[in-house]
Amino acid sequence: MKRFVSDVVHDKEIVDTVFEASQGAIEAARKYGPENVVNGAFGTYFDETGKLLTFDTVYRAFDAVDDIQKSKYASSIMGSDEFQRAVKDWLFKSADIDIDCDVIATPGGTGALSSTIKNGLVPGETVIHPDIGWGPYNTIAREQNTPIASYTLFNEHNGFNVTSFEATCEAVMEKQHKVLAFINDPCQNPTGYTMSKEEWDQTLVAVERVAEKGPFILVLDIAYIDFNKRGDAYKQLFKRLATLSENVLTVITFSVSKTLTAYGMRVGAQVLISNNETQREKFKHACGNTARGTWSTVNNGGMRVFADIALDDGLKTRYMKEKAKYINLLNERAGIFVREAYDVGLPIYPYQEGFFVTIKIEDAALKNELHLKLKTMNIFFVNVYGGLRVAICSIPKNKLEGLAKRVKVAYDTLVENGNKKD
């Protein structure tokens, strides 16, 4: 009998570890009371009262957007003129950078990532991801029928592993004469790592070396850029991207949804940078065609409110002031968990800033056991490659106090029991 689904997709199933863990936390809160549950699964920002964080600046500006403007289609498949200008101003002009680029509006950062793979590779070609990375990278690759090659994210000194990155890119270039590689920076999901200027300099030298043999698409996922500690100073990296050879196309994938903590608005952008203007133009039109054939246009009200904030000095100043308070809160939360982890000997990957800290457990069986054990303690994290992701963005400070110690006790118990079995 013929299947309803095509032979290409008949064995696909959606198993999302983030939503699975989040649903478990929600059900436990209903059963035992939210005060008795640690929800470190949600990748969205919750305030100290346990409510989803909504920036007053953003939603009052959204209230001011005309109902017709919210209701109607966007004026362009690529995104409205003011939205495209707002993205350029936000990423470049605010840091006093002048870069020639193209902007395509997408439904969140996920839409930008998906469109980039679809238009950069043909099915069967390999995409390159970090071994420790955002889980849906794998889902996006599977959806586009692109196999994955992983580079090792950290070296023996707990820094970005430029050597592994370059070697992986070289191997893929030899095989298919083209590379499409992801780097998630700053505030990497799930580890909270941010690359240094020196690491970026070394990485871009490696990109140039590999690009001598064929086209290189560097995908820079900056989903959490607006929660980094350096602010606009981080954006100086973009100047360097504009100097790369004609064989390199950089696609910056920008999540407006995360910047505004307006996740449901589903607004993002692909920003294309390359000195090969002809090929950049072709890529832009291909992405525009994907937009028309997949989601049509992006949330018009969401694009408009971002443009209003980005292009109005008064609104932007109020937004930045409000956001600064929550960056400080993230730092306070991270300080509690990271300090305690070091104090009690709970291994974590190098954390610098952002929404997540990841407990380092390279033994997959032990990691899975601990994940299940913590659930019985009403502690919910996300099971990722190489460890358990702790969403400090969603855990108030009073629940972070003592959390690393509780996890370490559970960890040690499992290790001791495992040794006894041996």
Image (cartoon, grey):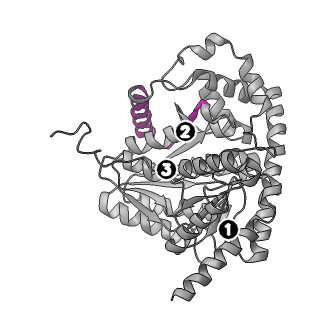
Judged by depth in the image, the label closer to the viewer, 3 or 1, is 3
Q: Is residue 43 visible?
A: no
Mark before the other along the chain sequence, 2 or 1: 2
Task: Estimate the spatial distance between the alpha carbons at disc 3 and disc 1, rounded to whole Å.
Answer: 25 Å
Depth check, front residue: 277 or 55? 55
Say which residue label 2 marks: 271
- In this view, the residue in front, 246 or 81, is 81
Name the residue carrying label 1.
Answer: 350
Vertical relation: 99 (above or below) 155: above
In the image, what residue type sits under mark 3? Asp
Q: What x and y, as percent, mark residue 147?
A: 35, 56
Residue type pointed to by label 1: Pro
Magenta region, residue range: 265-292
Q: Is residue 270 left or right of residue 403?
A: left
The residue that disc 3 covers is 16
The Cα atoms of the two marked residues, 2 and 3, are separated by 27 Å
